[in-house]
Amino acid sequence: MARVRAIEIGNFRGIKALTWHPAPGINCLIGPGDSGKSSIIDAIDLCLGARRNVQFTDADFHLLNVETPISIEITLGELDDDLKNLDAYGMYLRSFDAETGTIEDEPEKDLETVLTIKLTVASDLEPQWTLVSARAEGQGLSRSLGWGDRIRLAPTRIGAVADYHLGWRRGSVLNRVSDERADASAALAKAARDARAAFGDEAQEQLGETLGIVATTAKDLGIPIGENIKAMLDAHSVSFSGGTISLHDENGVPLRGLGTGSTRLLIAGLQREAAAHSSIILIDELEYGLEPHRIIRLLGSLGAKDAPPPLQVFMTTHSPVALRELSGNQLFVSRVGMGRHEARVVGNADGMQSTIRLYPDAFLASRVVVCEGASEVGLIRGLDQHRTTNGHDAITAKGVALVDCGGGGADRPFTRATAFQALGYRVAVVRDDDKKPTKAVEEAFVADGGRVVAWRDGCALEDELFLSLSEDGVIKLLDRAVELHGQELVNDHIKSASQNAKDLDAIRTEALIDGIAPESRVILGKAARSRKAGWFKSVTWMEDASRDIVGPDLVHADPDFRALIESIFAWAGDAG
């Protein structure tokens, strides 16, 4: 059945302009809030849905600009014979080049035959659906898709309230699964008559006084309604439509009483069975009402792992679970650039798939801080918590995600960072300087708009902390290390780092008498980053130390170190 080959949206809600060539299978729109994801889903629904009329308001126009019409064009390929019928649509058949994404107004031999449906809404708020053809327009011809064809092409939308599809209503998925139709008219008519008669017999006893008053009043007024009037069910109110027939479980309980997640799962499965009749499905907020394992099941039901894909699905999500389950070629980042919207495919190049698997949360943010290791993640998290207690906005409120690069080579943070950068995310790297990255790699990242915050010359984070904090801050960090790991281990690390020149007691004594010497600070930094059991080498350990000790001590710390920290939060809070 038909698949969407191209989407063009203009002046619709938050979208000034968008051109998108979606995939034939799963198309999952991701990105930060207010990036136009739901508007794209709505645009497809409005253009292709089987509606005779839709209510629009001025708020549906981009920036309330009603002087420029809303325009939504959807080009459909993989047409069946009815849609390629020359008598019906010959003047409107066009061709699509999948390699270039271009659409030609004339059908071409080696290109796919397509139809383009256009929805236009002008300032009068009246929607107009037409088929697009420069040839027809040149001859003064205009027509829309036939109503029967529109019903066949209409996508199935699974929303928060999806039980509409669990009855045999017009356009429901049950009417698309097969050509079977129930003719219950005779049975329903008899049931209605029986119900009216039965109620009338009971009502005679229950409403006798009222009926007597009505009969007397009518007689006095000369209204001929007879002596024995009755209270019966109104014949007009006892009516039945297709939706009267709905699915029930084995106990006779309507399936519309299922939970939201179960309803969505069932409808998605039924839609797959109905793919021969209608293959386009729309889902806004895929994860709504579903636990993680059921999200995975829903994606499987939609054909996320199948080749060729059984359905063309347009969906949005804020679920990291969904991102892990999908491939990069099924994910599209929605964002605005240079006055136009984009739906940019994430893809699988340059280790992108592993980045999705490891850091799905970051793809749902607007900007990303790639940290060399867990210590940097913990530092920023802890400082952020300290800052929020002092009236600052949390960086999470600014749409910032932290990525733990897990150490490795010095170029590794930039490999991860450029993956996000290529998709239009604002990205910063926070790195150690004990091992320097390739100069050209870092320069290329910065040239593309990336930001780098590096600890000072030759320092890892632990070196910076023990060199830069006040003496009180250093002692508190040392005490925290003992609290976490025990005095014996900390002492062994100090002795190893100093080649037995100093130990824990010696440094504490030193602090009491003359203050901690610069060389002792160097030793503590080296001891703290011991490879076997670093004192703060986990997100939680560094987060707690950062919140409780580093944050409060920053005001007394070395100004250059404080400036580095402030630059991270200035970038995170920058609205640019």
Image (cartoon, rainbow, N blue to C red):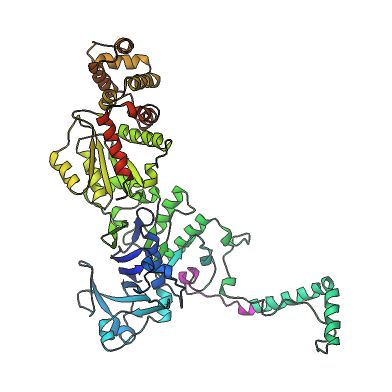
x then y, percent, for residue 276: 39, 70
In the depicted structure, whether residue 231 falls above or below residue 319: below
Q: Residue at x 21, y 30 (%)?
A: 456
User: Could you tell me residue 508's position as x and y percent?
Assistant: 33, 12
Q: Quadrant of residue 128?
A: bottom left
Is residue 181 found inside the magenta-colored segment of the image? yes
Q: Is residue 311 visible?
A: no
Residue 571 on the magenta span: no
**Main SS of residues in magenta:** loop
Q: Nearer the viewer, residue 442 or 270?
A: 442
Residue 64 drawn at (x, y percent): 39, 68
Left or right of 543 in this view: 514: left
| Residue shown at the point (33%, 69%) measured from the top left | 9
Side of 282 relative to 224 (left or right): left
Q: Which residues are magenta?
A: 170-187
Residue 266 location, x and y as percent?
49, 60
